[in-house]
Amino acid sequence: LLFAALTHAGKLWLQIQSWTPIVNDNPDQSSISISEGRSITLSCTYTGSAYSLHWYQQKPGSRPEFLVLINEASGTNVTDQQLDPRLSIKLHKQEKKVDLEISSTAVSDSALYYCGAASLFYFLC
């Protein structure tokens, strides 16, 4: 959980952000092998509402690295740096699903991929 205190119009607000990993309920995607140069789409479904949906990549022996997030309401993509042009994120709001597509795959793409949902709550103190 991430907490922040904000003031607006002379009132104190408490912002709470929580992050929940999304469990992949598709056993066909638990381990995927494809040929180099092909495209692959990884999908996660979520329940309820989310402020944003995130994708992370974890290479062997390393910590997870943030790739990209998409805002559920606006569909806006956000990254910490320039997104690899081979990666794209797509939100399917009606199906409550978020896809990460990797085009022109390479051996260096071999990793665990995680998706998660962040929720944002505001309380007037």
Image (cartoon, grey):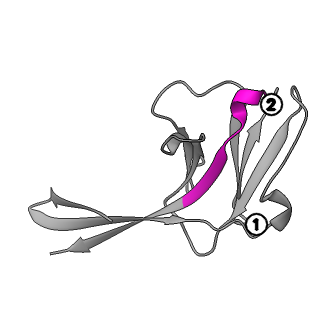
Q: Nearer the viewer, mark 2 or mark 1?
A: 2
Residue 95's disc number: 1
Instruction: Please report the bounds of the magenta region as a residue range.
Output: 106-116
Label count reads 2
Q: Residue at x 89, y 39 (%)?
A: 34
Q: Which amino acid type is shown beneath numbered disc 2?
A: Ser
Foreground residue, 47 or 110?
110
Foreground residue, 66 or 17?
66
On screen, residue 18 above or below 36: below
Residue 34's disc number: none
Q: Position of residue 2 (x, y in %)?
A: 29, 61
Q: Which amino acid type is shown beneath numbered disc 1?
A: Glu
Q: Position of residue 83 (x, y in %)?
A: 58, 28
Q: Residue at x 70, y 36 (%)?
A: 88
- In primary-sequence order, the first of circles 2 and 1 is 1
Foreground residue, 119 or 32?
32
Near mark 2 (Cα within 10 A), the count class, few <14, some 14-19 or many ≥20, is: some
In this view, which residue lies farthest toward the front? 61
Inspect the magenta stretch and tell me whether residue 6 lies in it: no
Q: Position of residue 81 (x, y in %)?
A: 48, 27
- Quickly name the residue at label 2: 103
On screen, residue 105 above or below 50: above
